[in-house]
Image (cartoon, rainbow, N blue to C red):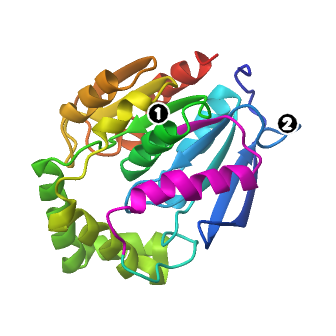
């Protein structure tokens, strides 16, 4: 693995690729003089209401700490990518993992990604690692779901109430603009659909052979430590988990120093 980077500013580039049948906005961060892609690149997968912008400065901090390049992208229906044109269904996570993400990686020349997924993005990272067990250099999840809990549904119902009252809608509109309504309903309606209640990927975890670090806040509004234990106990490769006290659903913001330290240690330990 590369040695830790110096204070030279990272080179940022924003562009679009065609993946999963849609135009997706991509941002890359590269250390000057090093090619983008190659053997190891940090690939960030955002949450169910997320975007490039909502990661804030965390991708840059982790790229600087590890000496690796980074790629962050807006999934279909989010941020600067194509707006959602149809209703989502219960297979959208699998499509993102099995079809769209591989096409993004191929388009950007990334051979061995280090996947870093938050919430929905963490689930997508795990589904990808199960489908393509020899490709990821490693997988880091934050607040990933591998099955649905009642606390998950209660948290989503609370988000719906906050969105309909206007407060959450306004915050999300800063990042998603005219896509805000379709983006939010595509997420909430899918997760709250009765037919989605039995969704689980626990039976896929054993197919994951790459090293996994699973992180979750002890006060996560959308899941319990049972998710962590299922991931760590279910994968076939090396695994570790961190339950962070006093932290909610966004560990990379709410416990940034600890999360940055844990992720950097994990990435530097990959062979």
Instruction: Tell me, yes or no, whether the highlighted magenta stretch contains residue 186.
Output: no
Q: Nearer the viewer, mark 2 or mark 1?
A: 1
Mark 2 is surrounded, within 10 Å at the Cα level, by few (under 14), some (14 to 19) or many (20 or more) other residues, namely few
For the point 64% across and 16% down, the residue is 271
Which residue in the protein does label 2 denote?
Answer: 34
Separation of disc 2 and disc 1 at Cα? 24 Å
Q: Residue at x 39, y 45 (%)?
A: 123
Task: Give, as a single range, the part of the protein colored magenta.
Answer: 88-115
Residue 215 vs residue 131, the one in the foreground:
131
Q: Residue at x 36, y 78 (%)?
A: 87
Direction from residue 39 to residue 77 in the image, left or right = left
Q: Quadrant of residue 245?
A: top left
Question: Quick check: 236 above or below 225?
Answer: above
Nearer to the camera, 24 or 89: 89
Which numbered disc flags the more N-terminal residue, 2 or 1? 2
Say above or below: 248 vs 39: below
**In the visual, does 2 lie left or right of 191?**
right
Report whether 236 appears left or right of 67: left
Q: Between residues 228 and 210, which one lies in front from this camera angle?
A: 210
Q: Nearer the viewer, residue 15 or 104?
A: 104
Count the marks. 2
Location of the N terminus by quadrant is: top right
Image side of residue 82 versus residue 2, left or right: left
Element assignment for label 1: strand
Q: Is residue 175 visible?
A: yes
The residue identified by callout 1 is 140
């Amino acid at each position: 693995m590369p040695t830790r980077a110096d204070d030279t500013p990272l080179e940022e580039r924003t562009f679009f690729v065609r993946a999963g049948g849609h135009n997706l906005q991509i941002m890359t961060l590269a250390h000057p003089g090093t090619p983008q892609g190659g053997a190891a690149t940090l690939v960030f997968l955002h949450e169910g209401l997320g975007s490039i912008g909502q990661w804030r400065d965390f991708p840059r901090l982790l790229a600087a700490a590890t000496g690796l390049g980074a790629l962050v992208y807006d999934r279909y229906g989010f941020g600067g990518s194509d707006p959602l044109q149809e209703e989502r269904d219960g297979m959208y996570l699998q499509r993102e993992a099995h079809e769209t993400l591989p096409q993004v990686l191929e388009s950007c020349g990334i051979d061995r990604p280090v996947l870093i997924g938050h919430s929905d993005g963490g689930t997508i990272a795990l589904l990808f690692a199960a489908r393509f067990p020899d490709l990821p250099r490693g997988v880091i999840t934050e607040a990933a779901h591998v099955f649905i809990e009642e606390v998950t549904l209660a948290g989503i119902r609370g988000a719906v109430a906050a969105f309909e009252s206007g407060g959450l809608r306004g915050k999300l509109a800063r990042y998603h603009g005219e896509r805000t309504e379709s983006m939010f309903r595509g997420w909430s309606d899918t997760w709250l659909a009765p037919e989605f209640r039995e969704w689980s990927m626990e039976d896929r975890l054993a197919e994951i052979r790459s090293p996994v670090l699973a992180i979750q806040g002890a006060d996560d509004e959308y899941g319990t430590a049972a998710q962590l234990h299922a991931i760590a106990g279910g994968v076939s490769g090396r695994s570790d988990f961190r339950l962070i006290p006093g932290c909610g659903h966004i560990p990379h913001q709410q416990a940034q120093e600890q999360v940055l330290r844990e992720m950097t240690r994990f990435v530097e330990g990959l062979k």
